[in-house]
Amino acid sequence: MSAHSSETDRTTHHDAGEGLSTFASIARLYPYLKPALPRVTLGMVAALLASVVSLAIPFVLQRLVDGTLLHRGGDRYEVIGAAAAILGLGIAEAVLISLRRWFVLTPGTKVEATLRNGLYNKLQHLPVAFHDRWPSGQLLSRAVSDLNLIRRWLSFGLVLLVVNVVTIVVGFAVLFYYHWLLAVVMVVLSVPLWVAGFFFERKYHVVARRSQDQQGDLATAVEESVHGIRVLKAFGRGGHALKGFREQAEQLRGTELEKARAVAGLWLWLLMVPDVAFAVCLGLGVWLVSQDELTVGQLLAFFATATVLRFPIESIGFLLSMTFDTRTAVDRFFDVMSTPNLIDDPEKPAHIESPRGELVFDNVHFRYEDSPERFPDLVDGINLTVRPGETMALVGLTGSGKSTLTSLVPRLYDVTGGAIRIDGVDVRDLTLEELRARVAMAFEDATLFSTSVRDNVLLGRPELAGDDPATVKAADAQLAEALEVAQASFAYDLPEGVDTMVGEEGLSLSGGQRQRLALARAVAAKPSVLVLDDPLSALDVDTEARVTERLHSVLTGTTALIVAHRPSTVMLADRVALLQNGRVTDVGTHGELLARNEHYKFVISSLEEEMTTTANTEEVDA
Ligand SMILES: Nc1ncnc2c1ncn2[C@@H]1O[C@H](COP(=O)(O)OP(=O)(O)OP(=O)(O)O)[C@@H](O)[C@H]1O
């Protein structure tokens, strides 16, 4: 057997980009951006050429003023020639800008789709322990708004940032060409801009992260209240939920205001500094012209160039804030993507040659990650063998770890000690695909997907999804059998029979109906081990008895492990395992345990009491 790490997934909700510079953080996207880079680069080249063209226009102006207008008395043909040159340059600039847009439009959407598919794939593979810790709204906001931001930055922000910075550098070089003193004044007066930009980065990054996290929390709040709308209404807690939501929304508003203030602070400098610089340069320039240090044409060209540089300089603030927002989005994306997946396929998978369905718990230990150290393991050395074809009920007081134990079989969590074996093979030595084909599970909380009854029930049989007549026939037969075993024939009476959409989480069905469909799904998967975590709790005792009897007769070769909360379920099992203080303290038939085990008697009587209370409540309700 291969050596197994007993360590569970200990990664917490962390900031994957902590300590990285903005560049290093965004550079982690490189593998995803690679296919888009040729077009983005072409877009940048087009934008750079457009900038060069716009910087060339002042040259033509200078020639026109200093040559034709001042020295050659405004020769008509030369004026027309210069005007035509300016018009031509203007048209070239417009064409190049359109080209830039055309080049960068599609790669951004492709990258966004790749990132989204990657994230979804990762979420599907991450273990349940990860999903226990992460609120769904946080994942939703990452999958939607963060990736949207990355796309917009790639198609627009990145290109303009690079091009504008290059334009500013080249533009300042051109200013030096016209007159060094004026250019030096311009550079010196723009120093406050760089200082403001530096402080802006430090502040904005922190606030942007807070804002995006708060958006995720808000999405979680909306999702939870929509999901739990019945509970909120039934308990009249809508107002309370709204109050909580308002507080969260108010916090987000505060953070957004803080962001806006930071951006406004930068804008103040971005608008004021060029104005001051223009005014100082104008005075100095006129003086230089009067001293014959500068021609009128050069002064004009200097200001025309400085005007061309105004948009790139002004846009830097917006582009920087967009870049820092993107950096935060990238960090949040990698928070999920860099979470190690410790429940994965083994390097050298084993294979069960001839499945029999023997299930063995060999000194199994398990504790949840967040369980305080002073507590013993929740599953504290369980030894249990469920024989092929046998139905074993798990019984124990509430909170004794029955559900937890069953979830270890299909590796929803990994054991922290010992091993679980199916037909002699450690479940961790099987590929997840094989393991989950061998083991099917139905839960008390029956989740149905927004699709037809047919697709919900045949979820575990992808090979039956084809359109050819033979596959459809086999699928129909399998569906009919599973629905019959689970006593779910009501599905044929739904408005569109088994093709009826059952809506989000099957809300249009009753709890018992949903449970029976979830059970039919587990049956249709044709597993060798069927794990049922109290999936019959919403059924009346008669239906439960019929379901269990059908399960017995149809699935003779299937081993079943059933968490039992009702004496009726217990009685239908071949044997019962009693769970107490994290261990199996007794195994036997219901009758044997009743006769010899005091704790078992106590558990069964408390289950009976619970049943009576529930039945009485139901009668009163009726
Ligand atoms: N995802 C989780 N993370 C941390 N602790 C958990 C988690 N799920 C369950 N627990 C804790 O583990 C203990 C056992 O829970 P479990 O649901 O396995 O018990 P159970 O015997 O099935 O209970 P019941 O009969 O009420 O369904 C409980 O104390 C519970 O709070």
Image (tube, grey):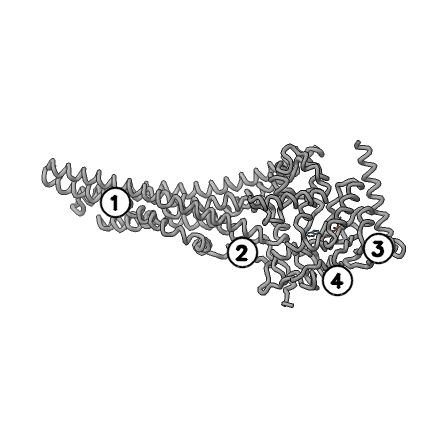
Residues at discs 3 and 4 in contact (Cβ within 8 Å)? no
Where disc 3 sits, the SS reads loop
> Disc 3 or disc 2, which is closer to the eye?
3
Q: Which residue is mark 4?
A: 381
Amino acid on which the number 1 mark rests in the picture: Val
Q: CA distance from mark 3 to mark 4?
A: 22 Å
Q: Which mark is residue 53?
A: 1
* Relative side of 281 to 572, left or right: left
Q: Which residue is mark 2?
A: 338
Amino acid on which the number 3 mark rests in the picture: Thr
Of the numbered discs 1 and 4, the one sitting upstream in the chain is 1
Query: Are there few (<14), some (14-19), or many (20+) residues within 10 Å of tag 2?
Result: few
Where disc 4 sits, the SS reads strand
Q: Which mark is residue 589?
A: 3
- Is the shortest distance between ligand 1 and the CB of mark 3 under 8 Å? no
- Residue 375 appears in the figure: no
Residues at discs 3 and 2 in contact (Cβ within 8 Å)? no
Q: CA distance from mark 1 to mark 4?
A: 77 Å
Of the numbered discs 1 and 3, the one sitting upstream in the chain is 1
Of the numbered discs 3 and 4, the one sitting upstream in the chain is 4
Q: CA distance from mark 1 to mark 2?
A: 44 Å
Amino acid on which the number 4 mark rests in the picture: Gly
Q: CA distance from mark 3 to mark 2?
A: 48 Å
Q: Which mark is residue 393?
A: none
Closer to the camera, 227 or 326? Answer: 227
The quadrant of the image that shows the C terminus is top right
